Image (cartoon, rainbow, N blue to C red):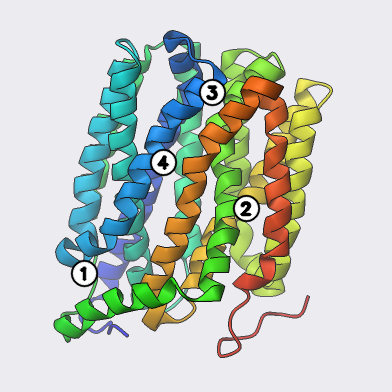
Amino acid sequence: MLGTTTVTPAATRSAITATYAAFFGSGFAFASWASRIPQVRDRLDLGPAALGLVLLAIAAGSLLALPISGSVISRIGSSRTVTAMAVLFGAGLITAGVGSFVGVVPVVIGLFVLGFANGAWDVGMNVQGTVVERHLGRSIMSRFHAGFSVGTVAGALVGTAMIALHVPVAVHLAVVALIVVAIVVWQAQRFVADHDGAEPAEEEEAPRVGALTAWREPRTLLIGVFVLMFAFTEGVGNDWISIAAIDGHHVSPALGTLAFAGFLTAMTIGRWFGPGLLDRYGRTTVVRALAVIGIAGVSLFVFAPAPAYAYAGTLLWGLGASLGFPVGMSAGGDDPRRAAARVSVIASIGYCAFLAGPPVIGFLGDHYTVLRSLIVVAALLGVAALLGGTVRPPATERPEPAA
């Protein structure tokens, strides 16, 4: 386990702020893109299935980045990785925005680059989060994820304003890219070192051996499936709530984006206040309760008799989706000696949701409408509830509170 003697309290506090900035910036940039999906869809005249395939480029890029990001971070560190990926993300965002005025191909290229950068950026900032936790001596990872959610809420609200003001997609996304890149690159320089330099050869060899072992661990794989269910729930909300509200509930584009913002707001609240519930009731009880809430929210959104009920559904949906991903990451890190390998495996499985989500909903949307196809999310949350026991800490760790 890494020591903390080489990092001062002031440096740790600075790194906490910098890590929050990385999470916030990632969420803000991604939600800025997501808020303009309906306008890109309309400009390119894409049906649900075609749009699903276009959005697939993001997941494809992320899944390509995940297997190699660990090696990259071990070589150049989380600070340089996040710096490089923020710049690459900005380039992809600008390409997608400008490309929407040209055709499908440049949009797909931009989204692939964006997705690749997002995957490696995500791993890099989570690695820094675990380093900060070790130096701080207490868990704050879920708060970092809440910072990401705050960024998505801010990005969605700004996106709503840009739509209402008729700001072109390319201008909006280019400005967001430049601002986010500048802030994240500056803050990433304040990250603390990923290791203290002790026994480097041994430190570098351990992750390679552990990764192969982790892929054969039943608990790790089941946690990965659990995260997959919640990631699908979150990803479909990000990609399709606006379109489902606009096309299915017949609200204006600005109000459709506002439904997306409501979903993100509820998810942010759940992540910020979730640690208290987890400490009091335990992971399994909390995630199962949230899965049930999510099922109710998705069902209400899909079958709402009026838009007001649909907006209430988005709030329950967002709350239900809030803790699945960060709890899965925490469960993968229960043993610090194997945390990196296990988290990598769990993240790789979980990100498959972002690969499957857009085309699944898109193809179902062609046959049953996008709104009705979202009921698939409720079914997968039921599976997540059944798998809730997999995130319970092992017997060697502190036992869960009695339900």
- The residues tagged by marks 2 and 3 sit, at their Cα atoms, a distance apart of 32 Å
Please tell me the numbered disc located at residue 270. 2
**360, above or below 50, in the image:** below
Q: Amino acid at mark 3?
A: Ala
Apparent side of residue 347 relative to residue 21 in the rendered image (left or right): right
Verify CB contact (< 8 Å) between mark 2 and mark 3.
no
**50, above or below 129, in the image:** above
User: Which mark lies nearer to you, 1 or 4?
Assistant: 4
**Badge 1 element:** loop
Residue 361 x/y as whole percent:
60, 32
Q: Amino acid at mark 1?
A: Ala
Q: Residue at x 37, y 72 (%)?
A: 341
- Mark 4 or mark 3, earlier in chain: 3
- Mark 2 or mark 4, earlier in chain: 4
- Mark 2 or mark 1, earlier in chain: 1
Which residue is labeled 4 in the image?
59
- The residues tagged by marks 4 and 3 sit, at their Cα atoms, a distance apart of 16 Å
Looking at the rendering, which quadrant does residue 16 occupy?
bottom left
Q: Amino acid at mark 4?
A: Ala
- The residues tagged by marks 3 and 1 sit, at their Cα atoms, a distance apart of 44 Å
